Image (spheres, grey):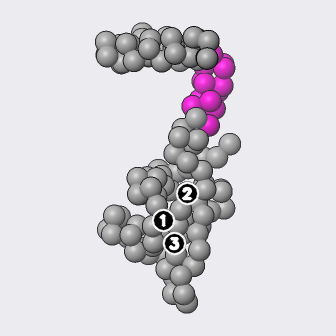
């Protein structure tokens, strides 16, 4: 299982939101409170985890980064792990918990209903 810390997630959000390769400078501009060394350290951890790819640009500390895993794939993986560990593998338990806490709007419920109906209909 891959765990991304909140600080690492800031970098991944920048990469995922850009939809293209980003440089160390791009990340620094979006995270002005972080030093270059911190960004390089966090990026290095993400590379070690396999969720970020990079290439060094020239002789400086500048790098170009791109996703090693898509945001959608990461969300799926984390959701499956959450369902397994918290809801004993039951998606029904997760959805029931959402309904019980009334976190779902009527629009959310309709979207879920439509999604489920599409999933259970035979495909042509």
Where residue 121 sits, quadrant-wise, is top right
* Quarter of the rendering occupied by the C terminus: top right
Q: Gap in Å between the C-alphas at discs 3 and 2?
A: 11 Å
Cβ atoms at labels 3 and 1 below 8 Å apart: yes
Q: How far across and how far down the image is residue 34, in percent?
A: 38, 68
x, y percent for residue 84? 66, 25
Give the percent coordinates (x, y) of residue 62: 49, 80
Q: Position of residue 112 (x, y in %)?
A: 44, 16
Q: Nearer the viewer, residue 72 or 32?
A: 72
Q: Which stretch did the figure color magenta?
A: 77-90
Question: Dot 2 corresponds to which residue?
Answer: 67
Q: Residue at x 58, y 60 (%)?
A: 52
What residue did someone put label 3 on? 64
- Residue 3 shown left or right of residue 21 in the figure: right
Vertical comparison of 101 with 30: above or below? above
Task: Place residue 90 in its image quadrant.
Answer: top right
The tag on residue 21 is 1
**For the N terminus, which image quadrant?**
top right
**Mark earlier in primary sequence (3, 1):** 1
Position of 107 relative to 2 (above/below) = above
State whether the magenta stretch is mostly helix, strand or loop.
helix
Q: CA distance from mark 1 to mark 2?
A: 8 Å
Label at residue 36: none
Taking 90 as reference, is 26 left or right?
Answer: left
Residue drawn at x 44%, y 14% is 114
Q: Give the side of residue 7 with respect to residue 88, left or right.
A: left
Task: Pick whichever of labels 1 and 2 is earlier in the sequence.
Answer: 1
Q: Say which element carries label 1.
A: loop
Residue occupying image coordinates x 41% and y 53%: 17
In the rendered structure, are the residues bearing label 3 and label 2 in contact, judged by CB atoms less than 8 Å apart? Answer: no
Tell me whether circle 1 and circle 2 mark residues in contact (CB < 8 Å): no
Toward the bottom, the furthest residue is 59
């Amino acid at each position: 299982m891959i765990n991304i810390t909140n600080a690492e997630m800031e970098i991944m959000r920048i990469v995922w939101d850009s939809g293209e390769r980003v440089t160390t400078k791009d990340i620094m501009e979006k995270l002005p409170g972080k030093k270059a060394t911190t960004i390089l350290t966090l990026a290095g951890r993400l590379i070690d985890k396999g969720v970020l790819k990079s290439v060094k640009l020239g002789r400086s500390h500048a790098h170009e980064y791109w996703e090693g895993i898509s945001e959608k794939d990461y969300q799926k993986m984390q959701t499956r792990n959450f369902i397994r560990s918290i809801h004993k593998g039951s998606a029904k338990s997760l959805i029931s918990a959402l309904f019980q806490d009334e976190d779902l709007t009527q629009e959310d419920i309709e979207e879920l209903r439509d999604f489920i109906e599409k999933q259970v209909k035979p495909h042509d």
